[in-house]
Amino acid sequence: MSTPAPLRILEWNVAVYRRVWRSSLLTSFLQPILYLLAMGLGVGALVNRNTGSGHILGGVSYIAFVAPGLLATTAMMVGAIESLWPVYDALKWGRQYEAMSATPLEPGDIVAAHALWMLFRTGIAAATVAAVMALFPDVRSLGLIAAVPAAMLSGIAFAMPLGAWAITRDREMSFPLIQRFVIVPLFLFGGAFFPLSQLPLLIRYIGYSTPLWHGVQLCRSLTNGTSLSALAALGHIGYLVIWALAGGLLMRRFAKRRLFA
Amino acid sequence: MNSMPLLRIVPPVVRIARRPQRMVERQLMCYRRTWPILLSGFFEPLFYLLSIRVGLGKLVGDVKVGGRILGYAEFVAPAMMASSAMNGAVYDSTMNVFHKLKYARVYDAVLATPMGIGDVALGEITWALIRGLLYSCAFLLTMIVLGLASSPWIVLSLPICVLIGFAFAAVGMASTTYMRGWTDFEFVPTATMPLFLFSATFYPISSYGSWAWVVQLSPLYHGVALVRAANAGQSSWGNVGHVGFLLTMAFAGLWVVSRRLQSLLVK
Amino acid sequence: MSPEPLIHATGLRKQFGDFTAVDGIDFNVQPGEAFGFLGPNGAGKSSTMRMIGCTSPISGGTLRLFGLDPATHGRDIRRRLGVVPQLDSLDQELTVEENLIIYGRYFDLSRAEARRRAVELLDFVQLTDRAKSRVEPLSGGMKRRVTIARSLINEPDLLLLDEPTTGLDPQARHILWDRLYRLKQQGVTLVLTTHYMDEAEQLCDRLVVMDAGRIVAEGSPRQLIEQHATREVLELRFPAGTNADNEAYALGIGDRHEVLPDRILVYAHNGDEALAKAIGAGAKPESALVRRSTLEDVFLRLTGRTLVE
């Protein structure tokens, strides 16, 4: 039996990645360690001293609150960034998509390969953060293992819609704007650092509507072992799946228009 | 000809420059079409300061620094301003310069004209400072609007941030001359992220106890301390030390740039 | 007596570590002349050009431009030069027009003057309609023309062109040659490198042939052909792989001969006569061609190698 088409495309991704992954190894471990030390323990000491905060945070220490947020936001960042410039690169600079469109590959294969690749990349990133989290007693739990796929899901909920956007572009000028006006605000206001309940009502609902908040909730309840009703869990998962699927369908449609027209 | 002794401490790159403003002019020309990106950067301080004010600030409450009680956002804002000056200068002097050096070959074309290496180096650093100053102004305005400015002396944060930018741009450009390829740039965040997190940015230096001297090795710490002092309207001899630290760093960086850029561009 | 040379070089050397790129060359370029460096890749042409352009310090010998030393007066010399580098170094972040204007500003022209000349020069290289275009979507030939327009923004006394038409299609090359020819007529001194014979013959009044960092011959294209080649050349093609067996037919029918991988060249005053002799001796070439000698033949004679390999 021959290898399925998307996996054949994935071989190309892996070949490129194999040449560069070592150079980012140190940074990818160092960053979450430093981050958890400074924000989790350093700022955490200030937060935990404040008597009112325990209640707002749902009775957990600040590091236990913020670490799962880091897990989900890291996956979001990787999924988003790797779907903008690299997709554009394969479209305009390297022209790998053009080369693929001249073979028996279909638009659906290209999109499926992108989804698999994003699952792989967000998986690596999330697993790294989870491994670092296990170093901190307050967040060490078996639930971390289940939190990794939850983070991956939040990652591709961003990756697929942004991939769909990137594949329609002729210039990359919008990418830094997306980073600045979508990714950074979500990073700050998506519920990773403080509960959305602290925000004004309108902004709160914007927060609830973003995939990141749902990802953060999933990761948090899994790592902290806090209870989450089956319905709520299904809701979070379903919402993330919808974003990923809708993005994937759009991306397939745009890829077809762009590459196979 | 007798050169004045004082001139000798000026790095050669500054002495040989004649028309560095032409490089700035080139940048302005580029931004004629991409100004939305420049402008969008003005929102960054708003997002960061707001998230601290409404979010983290509520969780932390007040902090006690040097006998004063401060709201957390008021404590963090000057540090964020200093960090933003660092980050902007580092980005401009590393990734941006490297791209122009190795890929766009912008400088090759410039050096075929009467412009010299001094003009290129000084012009690019000047641009980094101008852009940094614009962002610092945006930062200051945001602080005032959000009620985080507590003393009129906070206007001094503008020259302070230019100094921070100068120090980091000089050292950033010096390290760029050692970079072999894009993968080497992985080390840039590896250097700036710890500085950002551990320069008494998010919690007072007293939290480090007897390890405080390590924090004092961070150049960003000195920048943060200066902006914080400006916001508090406090003058002390310590501030002279902070300025001295940053100036030394800037001149050391320029010296390396002078020595290295020659070998990099003129073959 | 000839006027003071624009470029004067004696024993000029360029060393990169252990590698000697230019190995002691002497040449003079007179005002108004079109002077060429001819040679294969790696002969040292580009290194020589970069030294003349005052962007690369010399390793030995003397070099004077306009009577000035590049080591001390680089800035003053570059003020009077126009440079077209081998690889286009146009500013990708700017439009075609802006590229010219900012370049004029590097030469300290006023904004108004830079703008005026940019308009004029874009007309000269026939790119007025692309003035507002970004550089990236332009074809290779167009980019080259923008680079040439840019090099003229300071009304240079001396224009340096490093392989001006390498990689361009024939039509684009002819447009460029035409523009360069006009500049020459206007009295601009041209110094160019090339590994194309036809280019050297079209554009150069005088040229030097370089090989492995040295000058192996010097003169006008006509002189070089007269000195180092015969009037005509007979090209004989035999079935693949039989050149060695057929070499005997080339002996004694001309002044000398060369066996190349794909053909045998016979240098003779009269090519047709030589061909008749070869056929008379029983040669059965697949094809035979008689042509006039070119610089290619000169190069082959001088270095034992062809130019474009």
Image: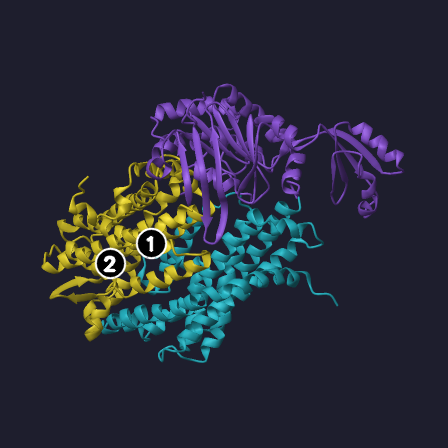
Chain colours: A cyan, B yellow, C purple
Q: Which residue is mark 1?
A: B174
Q: Are marks 1 and 2 in contact (CB under 8 Å)?
A: no
Q: Is residue A85 above or below residue A226?
A: above
Query: Quick check: can you spot residue C89?
Result: no
Residue C215 is marked as none
Q: Secondary structure at mark 2?
A: helix
Give the letter of the chain under mark 1: B
Q: Amino acid at mark 1?
A: Ala
Q: Amino acid at mark 2?
A: Ala
Horizontal arrangement in the rendering, residue A41 relative to residue C48 (left or right)? left
Of marks 1 and 2, which one's residue comes earlier in the chain?
2
Quadrant holding the N terminus of chain B: top left
x and y percent of residue C81 in the render? 42, 30
x and y percent of residue B63 in the render? 18, 66
| Count of residue discs | 2
x and y percent of residue C207 in the render? 55, 31
Q: Secondary structure at mark 1?
A: helix
Query: Quick check: can you spot residue A108?
Result: yes
Mark whose residue sits in front, 1 or 2:
1
Pointer 1: residues within 10 angstroms few (<14), some, or many (20+)?
A: many
Q: Which residue is mark 2?
A: B79
User: What residue lies at 82% left-to-right and 42% top-to-bottom?
Assistant: C248
Q: Quadrant of residue C108?
A: top left
Q: Is residue A82 above or below residue C233?
A: below
